[in-house]
Amino acid sequence: MRVYLDYNATTPVDPAVLDAMLPFLRENFANAGSVHTPGQRARAAVDAARDSVAALIGAKASEIVFTSGGTEADNLAIYGAVAASSNPRKHVIASAIDHHAVLHTCEDLQEHGVDVTFVPVRQGPEAQGLVDPGEVRRALRPETVLITVMHANNELGTIQPIEEIGRVAHEAGACFHCDAVQSAGKIPVDVSRMGVDLLSISAHKFCGPKGVGALYVRTGTPIVPRFRGGHAERDRRPGTENVPGIVGLGKAAELARVKLAEDSARIAALRDRLESELVGRVPGALVNGDRERRVPNTLNITFRGAGGEALLIALDLQGIACSTGAACSSGSTEPSHVLLAAGLSHDDARSSLRFSLGRATTSDEIDYAIATVPAVVERLRAISPRSTAAPALAR
């Protein structure tokens, strides 16, 4: 049996999304920038998709900029907002557990003279992995031009207090960006309620195609484009539109909005059953992250005494696909920066697995994982020279 539990890395394309895309890969292949009838047909499809994406996040269609995915959206937001600021001295605030698309961009800004403060997250059993809005407030400076904090963490699933952080940002007159790649399509996202100026999403995280995403830009928020060329996307992102991908993103957004409540309830119930059974059957298993404020599909567990990479390979041989962390960090010899920031030791961080569920996850698949994972952990612990597993271990 093959069981896919790595939906935070990517999701299968929903059949309805594929059906919506195919005509624009076949007969309706025209450039959406062309003035002839086929081009206008493509333009109408792009406009419809823009409406659908805007509806998913409570925005206006004119505030949606299509990109090649979440990474480009993050880059455009951060570089664009900093470049647009007239402040001669520039300071940026980011969270220590943000995605590398944000962290590496901020590190590049540092190399070019921009001051960046990476605020920590709470550690310990209470609110583990959450950004404290008070820490953001304390990090403020007169020259703070941008605050960027992700909505839901890709490894822990923790949902950050974005509304509170948004109020802090706007009281200080700073632009506020939120990476919502792991939350859009899984939980309600409303840009007005959240108080964000910029927000990134990616289609392939909610059953859309890879290689397409969007950046929400609140009306009146200045950003400097990263690319130069034509006048597409209201001069904010030049280049020929990826019409099939954009259509797929639009359809995925439509389905996510319609199915959100149903999907969330079903997936959360499966996730909770998986968590309860694994914690009950594996001595010393520890759940990471805040267990109340998290997206419904994500579970991160430390299995002390069984290395995460070895576990990952052993489970894959048993037909279970999961993850030791972010897919973009695959191959790294360093433990997860997210888990370290959340207070885990290097050994615990290296002994943790992320299980992420999705729309296609079935009860039978969860049953198989429940039956398989404990046996694999026990086998690896038995042969590990550093095994320290014991019931009721405290972190």
Image (spheres, grey):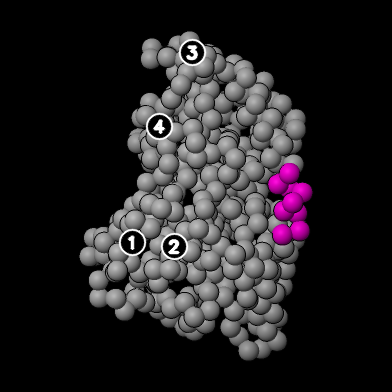
- Tell me, yes or no, whether the two marked residues, 1 and 2, touch with CB atoms within 8 Å: yes
Q: Where is residue 157 in the image (x, y as percent from the top left)?
A: 55, 43
In the rendered structure, which disc, 4 or 3, sits on the residue that comes first in sequence?
4
Kind of residue at disc 4: Leu
- Tell me, yes or no, whether the two marked residues, 3 and 2, touch with CB atoms within 8 Å: no
Residue 29 quadrant: bottom right
Q: Is 262 covered by the magenta stretch?
A: yes
Residue 378 quadrant: top right
Q: Mark on residue 317?
A: none
* 96 or 215, nearer to the observer: 96
Q: Check disc 1 and report the residue beneath it.
A: 140
Residues under labels 1 and 4: Cα distance?
27 Å
Can residue 276 be seen from the camera position used here? yes
Residues under labels 4 and 3: Cα distance?
17 Å
Q: Mark on residue 168?
A: 2
Kind of residue at disc 3: Ala
Q: Check disc 3 and report the residue beneath it.
A: 390
Residues under labels 1 and 3: Cα distance?
44 Å
Q: Is residue 46 above or below residue 386?
A: below
Residue drawn at point x = 59 percent, y = 16 percent: 375
| Residue range of the region highlighted in magenta in the rendering | 257-265
Q: Residues within 10 Å of mark 4 (few under 14, many from 20)?
A: many
Q: Nearer the viewer, mark 4 or mark 2?
A: 2
Residue 67 lies left or right of residue 7; in this view the side is left
